[in-house]
Image: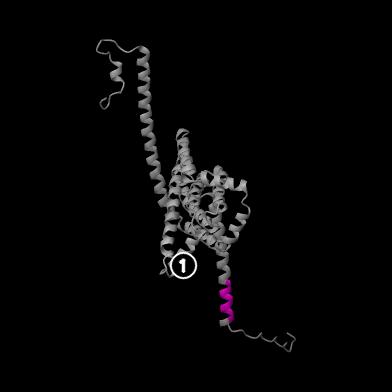
Amino acid sequence: MATEGRSLVEPLLRPSRRGRALPLFSRASLAYVDVVRRGAGREQDMAVGVYEAEFRAVVASVRDVIRERAGMLLRLALAGGALSWLLMAADAEINRLAAAMGNRAILTLAKAASFFGDFATLVLPAMVLLWFLGYSLRRRVWRMAALAGLVAAVLAGLAANTVKRAADRIGSGPEAAGPAAHVAVIVHHSSVSAQTATVFGAAAVLAAALPPARVPVMGVALLVAWSRVQLQRHNPSGVVLGAALGLWMGLLFGMAARRAAGRPDVPGPVREFDLALGRFRRRVGDRVRAARRWRFARTHVEVRAPRPPRAPGPGGE
């Protein structure tokens, strides 16, 4: 066994006990292998160092984004939850429509999308490949997006499974009552899709950090979400709730990845949505304040009769 700091092939390059050295070709081959091994080791150490530094940068950016964009993230979460709650009344009708459309070709496509859209078969290989491509081509934003997408997908899937199990435990017992049990029954009926949350978490990060990839990655995520509904694995409201959870987590880490890579931390669609929501909120507030002023004037201001016109004076004035 070679000692520390010595090459593994140095003993082979020395003459043997009989005084015969290895042939020149063999010695050159072993020397080349040793150089490659040492270069690979340095490259591996460098890659690990880059991974650790960029992972810490993404985590630090997540804290900054939460502190600065808490209002926008809260509005996005409330919008996703409200959409899922409104869709819950149409779950049965959408399930019947999906069952009526389920011919052999559609079911085959849905099974393939559901199988290949899992974390182990799609998200993990895609993020690892993207990171290595970014490292080889020296694209920092690619590496940041891969790290953020992997973390967002894992956290979104864990959050969906945690919410689903907590809802099952709270709302399953006969003694369950109160607002918490009511919310738990709603979540249990929705059956949050962890697979949809995972795929949308990774897709949202890529859409935020890499705008040219926005359309294809979101198309893949929508295909996976449709497959979960088509195969009757989840209710449509549960798929929407999982997609909202994944989008929230993905946008958070996507904005963090953009900031860590030195780019604007808020992507275009999210900024436009936030600005439109702010304009709508201001308009509603203006109308509410105008209605309050009108109501106050109607109930508190004394209405006086108009004064009669003045009679003309002696001079006609």
In the rendered image, residue 146 lying in the magenta stretch gets the answer no
Please state if 156 lies on the left or on the right of 277 as rendered. left
Q: Can residue 112 be seen in this view?
A: yes
SS state under label 1: helix
In the rendered image, residue 296 lying in the magenta stretch gets the answer yes
Can you identify the residue that label 1 sits on? 182
Q: Is residue 216 above or below residue 76?
A: above
Q: How is the image coloured?
A: one colour
Residue 5's x, y, as percent? Answer: 27, 26
Nearest to the observer: residue 86 or residue 253:
86
Q: Which residue lies furthest to the front in this view?
A: 104
Q: Residue furthest top?
A: 19
Name the residue rendered at 42%, 68% in the picture.
174
Q: In this view, does 223 lie above or below 177?
A: above
Q: In the image, which residues are magenta? A: 290-298
Nearest to the observer: residue 248 or residue 301:
248
Please state if 7 lies on the left or on the right of 256 as rendered. left
Name the residue rendered at 38%, 18% in the picture.
29
Residue 134's x, y, as percent? Answer: 47, 36
Nearest to the observer: residue 294 or residue 92:
92
Which quadrant, please, contains the N terminus? top left
Looking at the rendered structure, the number of numbered marks drawn on it comes to 1
**Crowdedness of circle 1 by 10 Å Cα count: few (<14), some, many (20+)?**
some
Name the residue rendered at 48%, 35% in the picture.
133
Name the residue rendered at 36%, 30% in the picture.
42
Nearest to the observer: residue 311 or residue 138:
138
Instruction: Please name the predominant secondary structure of the magenta segment in the image.
Output: helix
Q: Can residue 217 be seen in this view?
A: no
Q: Is residue 133 above or below residue 105?
A: above
